[in-house]
Image (tube, coloured by chain):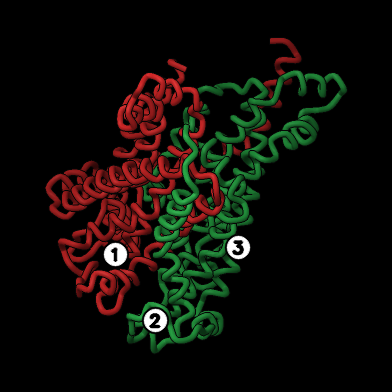
Chain colours: A green, B red
């Protein structure tokens, strides 16, 4: 194909910046003085302020929610990988009884709607006495993400040549050792993608979190943001600041860990 | 079975067992249990828990609110997915030749996709705010986007397209990058015009990816919940109430676990119908590959 002119590249970047305007507007709003929020135009405020962030940190449930979300996200990722990676290893390298049916079930369950499983899960969590705890969210989120983890990791591990694990077996390495010393290092980039997507899912997840939590003790960021209080008027500036805080991990992932994010997304769905 | 094979089998079972137990307890179990729940009248507040058989489904068949939610779900799904596919394809084509700032371009694009749905809802709530919201300031019109029965659903669809189009664009873009330049050179040698090249070369090569993306996005649109629940809450007057929102309200606001589960089952069946189509397409692709 012909090389296209630099101007076209700049135009595409400008258009994509326009595409991000809804978020950028929220970002600008979070730094606007209260009195100028509804006084537009002009679009740009007379000065920028941190007062909304001050309110969010000092007077809202967000600080606690950020801690809850971080914990739930990390624990969900760890549990999902701890359960999913050994299963994927077995599916990829060992003869698992009923492997075909199991894989079909796993792929099918990635399509399960949360709204259908949320009522039985609610009864399970209530029965286990886990309502309003991190554990309820970690269990629900990890089990929801688990089929993705197994499916993706199985695909990645299938790409490792059989000779390598056979050589390891000849050297007397047990299966756990083979998994740890050969399969895990060789699929590390894939595992990073899977872990990233699992964390992002848990960070963004709303339906389970809204249903299984009851107080600030376990409410995650999306729940706190959905319930963000306004007494007489909607505190747009404070909500904007809270939204920006809720967006920090996704933004960091998109900007700094983009390669792994994209790889995981594409591997999850493209039939190569 | 030799001793070695038996040992292999035991090892395989040990590796998959923890995952299978968790999936059975927290995914497959609930997925079956919800069918059973949907056959019961279960009102935890009043301590009611009895079998009603297909009573909830019989009620839904004549429930105007259910059919409204069904209609909204279908309109939302078709409109969102169609717009995402067209726009996503356009963005992918625009990005294909990008040489400068490719990473930044992808960051700007994927940002909308990666945000929590609740953030997107809050962002658009503010954009649509009638008195001083960004959209009305730009348009110079005092429209009540989320409060108007005619505008609310389109406004919701726009927010959903904003958040999910990047997913489609990324997939198409990734596929475009794998098409060898030689294919286009051949088309150029044959004197094919730009539109002919797009129609007879690019589009057929994108076909499988578009199909997979279409089905993926349809699944997600049918299951969508957080955006509409927070942005419009199903309002005004139920104009944006999808099946998921109706199910949630029945389950946890009017606390009718059996009835809400029945609506959840309907969503489940809709999704499985689309998923079955997806698996068939995948299998056909594997067969032809």
Q: Residues within 10 Å of mark 1 (few under 14, many from 20)?
A: many
| x then y, percent, for residue A238 | 45, 79
Chain under disc 3: A
Q: Position of residue B246 (x, y in %)?
A: 26, 56
* Relative image position of residue B169 (x, y in whole percent): 42, 43
**Considering only vertical position in the picture, is A104 above or below B231?**
above
- Residue depicted at 24% across the width and 67% down the height: B146
Which subunit holds the residue at mark 1? Answer: B
Of badges 3 and 2, nearer the viewer stands: 2
Please tell me which residue lies in front, A58 or B260. A58
Q: Is residue A264 visible?
A: yes
Compared with A107, A206 (above or below) is below
Q: Residue at x 34, y 46 (%)?
A: B87
Task: Categorize mark 3 by other alpha carbons within 10 Å: few (<14), some (14-19), many (20+).
Answer: some
B16 w.r.t. A100: above or below: below
Residue under numbered circle 1:
B233
Residue B276 seen: no
* Mark 2 residue element: loop
User: Which residue position is annotated with label 3?
Assistant: A70
Please indicate whether residue B5 sits to the left or right of residue B258 in the image: right
Q: Earlier in the sequence, mark 3 or mark 2?
A: 3
The answer to which image quadrant residue B273 occupies is: top left
**Subunit that carries the residue with mark 2:** A
* Residue under the point 39% across and 50% down: B164
* Residue A235 numbered tag: 2
Looking at the picture, how far across and down is residue B46, in whole percent? Answer: 30, 64
Direction from residue B176 to residue B150 in the image, left or right: left
Determine the secondary structure under disc 1: loop
């Amino acid at each position: 194909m012909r090389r296209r002119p630099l101007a076209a590249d700049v135009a595409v970047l400008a258009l994509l910046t326009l595409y991000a305007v809804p978020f950028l507007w929220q970002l600008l709003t979070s730094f606007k003085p209260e009195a100028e929020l509804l006084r537009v135009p002009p679009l740009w405020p007379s000065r920028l302020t941190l007062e909304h962030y001050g309110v969010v940190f000092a007077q809202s449930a967000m600080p606690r929610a950020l801690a809850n979300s971080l914990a739930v996200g990390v624990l969900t990722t760890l549990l999902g990988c701890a359960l999913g990676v050994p299963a994927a290893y077995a599916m990829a390298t060992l003869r698992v009884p009923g492997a075909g049916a199991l894989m079909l079930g796993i792929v099918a369950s990635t399509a399960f709607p949360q709204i259908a499983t949320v009522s039985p899960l609610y009864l399970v969590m209530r029965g286990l006495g886990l309502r309003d705890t991190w554990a309820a969210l970690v269990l629900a989120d990890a089990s929801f993400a688990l089929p993705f983890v197994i499916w993706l990791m199985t695909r990645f591990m299938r790409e490792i040549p059989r000779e390598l694990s056979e050589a390891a077996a000849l050297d007397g390495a047990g299966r756990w050792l083979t998994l740890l010393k050969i399969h895990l290092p060789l699929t590390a980039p894939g595992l990073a993608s899977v872990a990233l997507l699992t964390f992002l899912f848990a960070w963004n997840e709303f339906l389970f979190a809204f249903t299984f939590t009851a107080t600030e003790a376990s409410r995650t960021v999306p729940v706190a943001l959905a319930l963000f209080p306004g007494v007489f008027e909607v505190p747009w500036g404070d909500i904007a600041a809270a939204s920006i805080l809720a967006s920090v991990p996704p933004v960091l992932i998109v900007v700094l860990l983009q390669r792994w994010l994209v790889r995981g997304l594409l591997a999850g769905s493209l039939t190569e | 079975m030799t001793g070695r094979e038996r040992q292999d089998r035991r090892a395989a079972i040990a590796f998959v067992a923890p995952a299978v137990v968790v999936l059975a307890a927290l995914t497959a179990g609930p997925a079956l249990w919800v069918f059973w729940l949907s056959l019961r009248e279960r009102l935890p507040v009043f301590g009611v828990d009895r079998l009603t058989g297909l009573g909830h489904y019989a009620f839904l068949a004549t429930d105007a609110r259910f059919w409204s939610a069904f209609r909204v779900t279908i309109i939302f799904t078709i409109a969102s997915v169609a717009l995402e596919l067209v726009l996503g394809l356009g963005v992918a084509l625009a990005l294909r030749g990008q040489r400068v700032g490719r990473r930044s371009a992808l960051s700007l694009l994927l940002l909308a996709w990666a945000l929590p749905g609740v953030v997107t809802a809050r962002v658009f709530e503010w954009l649509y705010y009638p008195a001083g919201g960004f959209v009305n300031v730009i348009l110079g019109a005092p429209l009540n986007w989320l409060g108007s029965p005619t505008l609310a659903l389109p406004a919701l669809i726009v927010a959903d397209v904003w958040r999910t189009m990047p997913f489609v664009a990324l997939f198409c873009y990734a596929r475009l990058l794998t098409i060898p330049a030689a294919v286009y050179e051949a088309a150029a040698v044959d004197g094919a015009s730009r539109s002919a090249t797009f129609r007879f070369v690019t589009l057929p090569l994108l076909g499988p990816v578009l199909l997979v993306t279409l089905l993926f996005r349809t699944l997600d649109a049918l299951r969508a919940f957080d955006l509409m629940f927070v942005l419009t809450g199903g309002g005004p007057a139920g104009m944006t109430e999808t099946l998921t929102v109706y199910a949630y309200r029945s389950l946890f606001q009017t606390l009718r676990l059996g009835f809400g589960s029945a609506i959840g089952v309907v969503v489940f069946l809709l999704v499985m119908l689309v998923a079955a189509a997806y698996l068939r397409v995948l299998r056909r692709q594997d067969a032809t590959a």
